[in-house]
Amino acid sequence: MAATTSNVLQLQDPNRRSRTLWQRAISRLRRDRLTLLAMGVLLALMLLSYGSPLVNRYVLGVDPLLPDTPNRLLPFGAPGHLLGTDDLGRDHLARLLSGGQVSLSISIFSALAILGIGLVVGLVMGFSPGVVDDIFNWLITTLDSLPSLYLLIAVSALLQPSPQALILIIAVTSWTGAARLVRGETIARRELDYVLAARTLGASRWRIMFVHILPNLLSILAISLTVGIGGVILAESALSFLNLGVQPPTPTWGNMLIDSRIYYRTAPHLILMPGLLISITVLCLFVLGDGLRDAFDPRTED
Amino acid sequence: MARYIVRRMLQAIPTFFGITILAYLLMSLTPGGPLAALYFANPRLSPQDREAIGLRLGVNDPAPIQYLRWLIGDDWMRWDSDGDGAADKSFLIPLDVNEDGAPEPPGERYGVLRGDFGRSFFNNRPVLEVLTERLPATLELSVSSFILGTAGGVLVGVLAALNKGRWFDSLSRVLAVVFDSIPGFWLGLILLLVFSVGLGWLPLGDRCRTTLDPSCPPIWQRINYMILPVFVLSVSSVAVLSRYVRASMLEIISHDFIRTARAKGLSERRVWFFHALRNGMITLATFIGPAITGLLGGAVITETVFNYQGVGLTIVQAFGQRDYPIVMAVTIYAALATILGYLISDVLYGIVDPRIRY
């Protein structure tokens, strides 16, 4: 009898501590080359975009907002303008970088706001079956029965589209998916033993929601945030393209494409680059989201 | 099944009313309200005229009454019972609003529910007339993209599952993520640059050759105008659907009934395309509702890129002209289409999968 017990125990190295979900996920991510590549590209893009005031002044030596009409519509590789200039002679590379800063900020903050609204609404719905759940369900079904772009277009009428207003517009119209995700996950966990244990110990409903359930949702939320940022970049660029987004002269990757459409014959490179940057960023975010999903999935084998 | 369909339609009613409230709120919350839009359309209106129009449109009435007027009209709120042209009976609103002693003319609005979306602020035509004029363009674009996108998605998904781990599988999965990440409008612009500007093979946008006659020839005479927009609209459906079909086919192919079919000596093709695909269709049924939403949203972008005169382009133009009756009508039309799409999805689900009971 004693021998069998020790045999069972020997299966696990006594010095090795069992790893948490996050430790396992991180060690898996470190071996996932494609995801690491996507992270590297995203990091580089973010560094260049957020460092764009410094990069533009000290490395490129140009002002992305200052027109220089004698040098308008220069092609790739023109002296002093690596990616050429736009219709007002502004440096294309410098505008791409500072446009990236605006586009990325809008997307990151919108995705965070969407997640925040979705998290609170989803948790509350998951914990308040009955009237509250029904009312929010009706609201969600109503909002979801409009294509999101129509809703975005209609709400854009209310506000002058500054970057801050755009974040608000996107958050107010796009939180339903996140709320449904969190609601489903909350309901799935509501009846688990550890929640029952917390309730038995006298924990309040809010404490159970935010201290016991929320930490278990973090991995799902991280995946949803990553993919969500990608989705918002696409939505923001589509709105900008329809001239309903952030207005010039503030560059975003989306609104840089509107003006350049007219010059498709003389300067096709102005159309190429902003779209390419949007595609690469979104692609990296989607790949990263897939990688995170695999890393956090307990069924994935090490 | 019939009972289920009726129940689902009844469930759609609160959703539809939610949409009308939302649409109405958006219209009335807009800075200045509908009157500002009138002023925008005709800046020469004098303040007296504006006040008179405001009284006639009832902008000073309480908000619920205004909503009701917009939704079900005002011909029952103030009407003419003795045929002298002036209103003499009223319900909910006073007979003599401007208190000048003379009764107002009877209400003439029929409301959104009875198909009266009002008149376009911009060119004063009935909104419904503008929309029915633009609808065929959007329909031909969405229907062909839907057929191509679904067929392509199923085909690519099944072939990828059949060739799991081989080059076709890897290529289709990479392309699916790539096309999912490319903004549709940019793809459209690049395709125009390559095939229309560069190679000169395809026309540079529009629905057909521009002539004095505003109508277009039958669809088979202008296929070349449709190739690029249909490709842009359907490629994202193919990308999304192929991934779902691949996953569900791989899941189905490991089931016992497939082993039974193989054990009976059926050919591999028969097993995949008759036994497995029928079950894979369940994925397709759930895809239809979201696909219709996606097509409606995609149409806005695609029609703008290719200057294709459809409903999607109409909402963008109406927005630019602050033409709220049109914006709201298109919003409601899109909501109806989406609700219908999800209804079809649910019904098909029951047809394809006999295990589902309602």
Image (tube, rainbow, N blue to C red):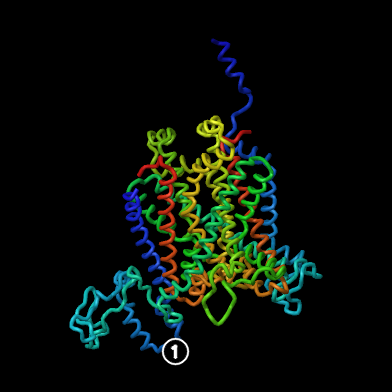
Q: Can residue A220 be seen in this view?
A: yes
**On the image, which quarter does residue A249 sit in?**
bottom right
Q: Is residue A30 left or right of residue B285?
A: right
**On the image, which quarter does residue A184 sit in?**
top left
**Where B69 falls versus B281 (above or below)?**
below
**Where A66 falls versus B239 (above or below)?**
below
Judge by depth and name the residue closer to the eye, A51 or B107: B107
Q: Is residue B178 left or right of residue B289?
A: right
Residue A165 position in % (x across, y down): 51, 66
* Count of number-bearing discs: 1
Give the residue number, with chain letter if any, for mark 1: B44
Outermost left residue: B82
Residue B165 position in % (x across, y down): 66, 40
Judge by depth and name the residue closer to the eye, B145 or A146: B145
Q: Is residue B305 visible?
A: no
User: On what subunit does the disc labeled 1 rest?
Assistant: B
Residue A158 position in % (x across, y down): 46, 70
SS category of the residue bearing label 1: loop
**Where B268 falls versus A44 (above or below)?**
above
Residue A11 position in % (x across, y down): 61, 21
Tag 1: residue type? Answer: Arg
Judge by depth and name the residue closer to the eye, B97 or B353: B353
**On the image, which quarter does residue B57 sit in?**
bottom left
Q: In this view, does A126 lie to the left or right of A273?
A: left
Say which quadrant the C terminus of chain B sits in. Answer: top left
Assess disc 1: are there few (<14), some (14-19) or many (≥20) residues with their C-alpha within 10 Å of its C-alpha.
few
